[in-house]
Image: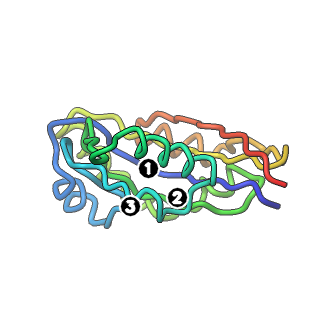
Amino acid sequence: MKTKIDVGFAYIGNGFSVESITSALDILPTKAWDKGEKINYEDILTKDISKDTKRKFMEIQNAHTDSFDMHRKSTKWEVSVGQTYSLDVNEQFKKLIRILDSKVNKILEVNEKFNMTPQISIVIEVVNGETPAIFFDSQTVNFMSKIKGSIDIDLYYMQYD
């Protein structure tokens, strides 16, 4: 199996700081940045991303002859389970629920304090046609309802030999 799934919980927007969310939820983010922060080209290429994605970033770098000068357009605070080889989205989602389930009241406080909606981001890299099951059981649906969140699913189809 080569297909990978990552499930993350994030606040994305403006008008809050990474530190304020970390403090309120008492969870260290796995990924975070502030609006206006420079995107570090070397960091992008050392992450566990596909060869196609790395190639695209290299093309961008080559197009900017002097420097790679891109900046974040919003603030982001995210905790994720990390990319895992899997063919079951709900299984990966349950890992995230185990991290956040005891924090539901704190999540609702953050939602209200900063007038934000938390986003669950599901990123699937489908490799060689190994398409995962995209299914949410009642526990997962109930959790989403409790936190008043939204879900974003991104599918990337990769072809490896």
Label 2, on which residue? 96
| Residue drawn at (78%, 44%) of the image | 133
Q: Which numbered disc flags the more N-terminal residue, 1 or 3?
A: 1
Q: Is residue 32 left or right of residue 138?
A: left
| Residue drawn at (52%, 58%) of the image | 96
Spatial CA distance of label 2 from label 1 is 8 Å
Packing grade of label 2 (10 A; few <14, some 14-19, many >=20) is: many
Q: Check residue 107 in the rendering and tell me which mark sits there, or answer none.
A: none
Q: Position of residue 99 (x, y in %)?
A: 46, 64
Q: Nearer the viewer, residue 13 or 127?
A: 127
Callout 1, which amino acid? Phe
Q: Nearer the viewer, residue 150 or 48?
A: 48
| Residue occupying the far front of the picture | 65
Q: Closer to us: mark 2 or mark 3? A: 3
The colouring scheme, among rainbow, by chain, secondary structure or one colour, is rainbow
Q: Position of residue 112 (x, y in %)?
A: 22, 37
Contact (CB < 8 A) between labels 2 and 3? no
Q: Secondary structure at mark 2?
A: helix
Label 1, on which residue? 9
Q: Which numbered disc flags the more N-terminal residue, 2 or 3?
A: 3
- Asked where in the image residue 40 lies, by quadrant, the reply is bottom left
Callout 2, which amino acid? Leu
In the rendered image, the quadrant that contains the N terminus is bottom right
In the rendered image, the quadrant that contains the C terminus is bottom right
Label 3, on which residue? 42
Q: Nearer the viewer, residue 103 or 151?
A: 151
Callout 3, which amino acid? Glu
